[in-house]
Amino acid sequence: MANIAKVNGVGISAGSSIAEGKYTGDGATSLAISGLGFAPKMVFITQISYSGTTETHVAMDSSVEDVGAGHSWRMSDGQIYDNRIIALGTDGFTVDDDSSDAHPNKNSQIYNYVAWG
């Protein structure tokens, strides 16, 4: 199957699984988002506030880009952070608040996500 997109040379093929949705953060150190029906290889999580600011975190498994388990990129500054998207599982992903009620699991904040597998 032909690739429709590539990230660091790894293709996302037309037959890949994709899911989108939203969740509400609970401010805890671990919130599992499950029910995707596949193991994600890449997850984008975006929060858009009413003031227009955006906070986006991206996590990828090691077949796409090895940033280390429990780490994700924050798109606004290009830095790698731990304790944000802490796991990509067999049916979803797990987010954290970095023990400070931060994104992408800030209490009562609504987040949108897109996951590819």
Image: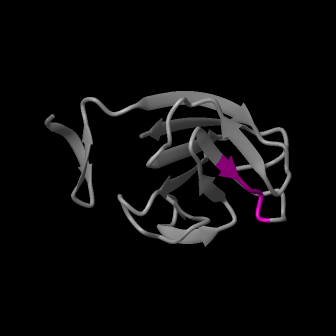
Query: In which quadrant of the rendered image does the C terminus lie?
Result: top left
Q: Which residues are magenta?
A: 94-98
102 to 35, vertically: above or below: below
Q: Residue drawn 65% across and 59% down?
A: 86
Expressed as whole percent of the image width and height from the top left, the position of residue 74 reads 54, 61
Q: Residue at the spot x=50%, y=35% of the render? A: 38
Main SS category, magenta section:
loop
Q: Nearer the viewer, residue 42 or 37?
A: 37
- Front residue of this view, candidates 84 and 30: 30
User: 50 and 4: which one is in front?
Assistant: 4
Quick check: 89 left or right of 2? right
Counting from the top left corner in percent of width and height, residue 96 is at 74, 56
Looking at the picture, the colour scheme in use is one colour
- The structure residue drawn at horizontal position 54% and vertical position 29%, both measured from the top left corner, is 37
- Residue 62 visible in the current orientation: yes
Please name the residue shown 52% across and 29% down the image.
Answer: 20
